Image (cartoon, coloured by chain):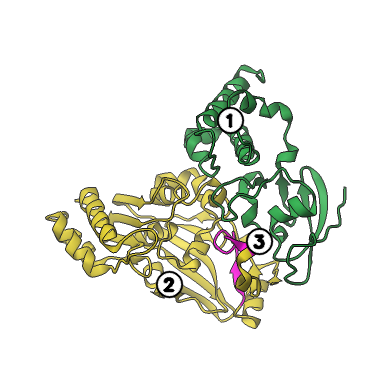
Chain colours: A green, B yellow
């Protein structure tokens, strides 16, 4: 897929556009963006990938978390041109089966933080060697949740880790 | 907003020579906070450091860890040698924001941003780090403890880029990093302290206690004099001579001085 893209109408134009390519959710994607445009805005307003949420706009809440070259980042703190020739994964790329433990474990209530939570959790589950140096709560500290009190999130990740070890997905 | 996008360090230095008001941009974790409301920020010209690959990598020599100009906190956290040989770098890096910030934020950016509340700068300074800056005029090496001239004022000219940060390896007999914030993650320091001891003596570095992150020569002299400070009051008096804390949105001058003195006394006495 090739998606020539210009900033959505109400985003400010701040300079000459920059043309880039990136691998977005596994698809080679061409973008033409304003230099001051945030990745979060390109995803939501340019490409209609509205799963990524804006919470605080200051890199605190983690609702806008996406994976950039496989690492979780706040897409409100990345300018779109900075992902040139890099790999971006958003919540739309996830396999629904991966979400089952979160739904079953009370990891989501209002849902505003959930897209970010599951992106960081996906990264953690794919890099379990992190748990030899880090606790789940430290790795998840960049995803604020006002509803669950975090226990449901942490327990769901623990359950997902265990399920993987048993070779099932429940 | 105008963005210069060099493909190499050499090209970057040429662009900076032509346009020394351009602001180098690496992780962007400071610049892009509340970005949609930052109208002045969008009027500036930036030098994007994302493409010169030679800036990103860090490497070890037999004498030092050499951080590149765009080496991130996460790069250092994930190198198993860091925790073994320069553990304060890992302690501090893990307290920067969250993983999402650690994955983007850079050590050189922390230095150049010049915040008095920086987390990365105090530990680099306690390890006697050297900032290697480069321009078309040549290369200059500046001890990080002599890098800052005042609040957000530093020995970095408009045409100069932080090329490397050299962190010397040494046999250290004691080292600590303490950050006091409102919570453990996603907090800016009310008080930051990094201390280390080697055959060169004590290094005591304070953050959020003065207009810049800075070494505390009076406390260092006190610790060096007999290896142990006499009392909390002695440490507090020495520290008061070294720093100038203020009341601001995060804390008060009184709290900062009292807490810092006690952390230093009970941590290192």
| Element on which disc 2 rests | strand
**The C terminus of chain A - image quarter:** top right
The residue that label 1 is drawn on is: A107
Looking at the picture, tell me which residue is in the foreground, B63 or A111: A111
Q: CA distance from mark 3 to mark 2?
A: 24 Å
| Element on which disc 1 rests | loop
Measured as percent of width and height from the top left, residue B153 is found at 44, 76
Residue plotted at (58% across, 54% down): B104
Q: Is residue B105 visible?
A: yes
The residue that label 2 is drawn on is: B142
Whether labels 3 and 2 share one chain: yes
| Element on which disc 3 rests | loop
Residue plotted at (75% across, 38% down): A93
Looking at the picture, tell me which residue is in the foreground, B150 or B62: B150
Looking at the picture, tell me which residue is in the foreground, B108 or B128: B108
What chain is tagged by disc 3? B
């Amino acid at each position: 897929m090739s998606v020539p893209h210009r900033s959505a109408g109400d985003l400010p134009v701040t300079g000459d556009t920059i043309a880039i390519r990136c691998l977005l959710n596994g698809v080679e994607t061409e973008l033409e963006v304003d230099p001051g445009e945030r990745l979060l805005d390109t995803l939501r307003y340019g490409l209609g990938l509205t799963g990524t949420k804006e919470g605080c706009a200051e890199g605190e809440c983690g609702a806008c978390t996406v994976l950039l070259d496989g690492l979780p980042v706040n897409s409100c703190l990345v300018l779109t041109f900075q992902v040139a020739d890099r790999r971006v994964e958003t919540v739309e790329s996830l396999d629904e089966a991966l979400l089952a433990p979160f739904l079953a474990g009370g990891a989501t209530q209002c849902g505003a933080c959930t897209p970010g939570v599951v992106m960081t959790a996906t990264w953690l589950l794919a890099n379990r060697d992190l748990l030899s140096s880090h606790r789940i709560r430290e790795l998840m500290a960049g995803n604020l949740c006002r509803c669950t009190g975090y226990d449901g999130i942490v327990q769901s990740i623990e359950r997902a880790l265990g399920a993987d070890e048993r070779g099932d997905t429940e | 907003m105008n963005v210069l996008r060099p493909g190499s360090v050499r090209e970057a230095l040429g662009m900076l020579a032509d346009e020394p008001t351009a602001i180098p941009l690496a992780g962007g974790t400071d610049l892009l906070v509340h970005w949609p409301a930052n109208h002045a920020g969008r009027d500036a010209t930036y030098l994007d450091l994302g493409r010169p690959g030679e800036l990103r990598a860090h490497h070890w020599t037999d004498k030092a860890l050499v951080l590149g100009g765009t080496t991130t906190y996460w790069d250092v956290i994930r190198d198993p040698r860091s925790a073994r040989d320069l553990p304060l770098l890992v302690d501090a890096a893990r307290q920067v924001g969250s993983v999402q910030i650690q994955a983007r934020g850079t050590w050189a950016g922390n230095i150049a941003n010049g915040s008095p509340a920086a987390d990365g700068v105090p530990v680099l300074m306690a390890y006697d780090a050297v900032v290697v800056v480069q321009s078309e005029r040549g290369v200059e090496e500046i001890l990080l403890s002599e890098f800052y001239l005042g609040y957000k004022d530093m020995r970095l000219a408009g045409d100069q880029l932080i090329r490397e940060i050299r962190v010397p390896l040494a046999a250290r007999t004691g080292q600590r990093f303490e950050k006091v914030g409102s919570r453990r993650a996603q907090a800016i320091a009310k008080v930051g302290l990094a201390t280390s001891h080697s055959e060169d003596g004590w290094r005591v570095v304070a953050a959020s206690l003065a207009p810049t992150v800075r070494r505390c020569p009076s406390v260092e002299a006190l610790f060096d004099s007999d290896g142990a400070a006499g009392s909390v009051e002695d440490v507090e008096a020495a520290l008061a001579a070294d720093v100038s804390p203020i009341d601001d949105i995060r804390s008060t001058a009184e709290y900062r001085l009292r807490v810092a003195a006690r952390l230093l006394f009970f941590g290192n006495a």
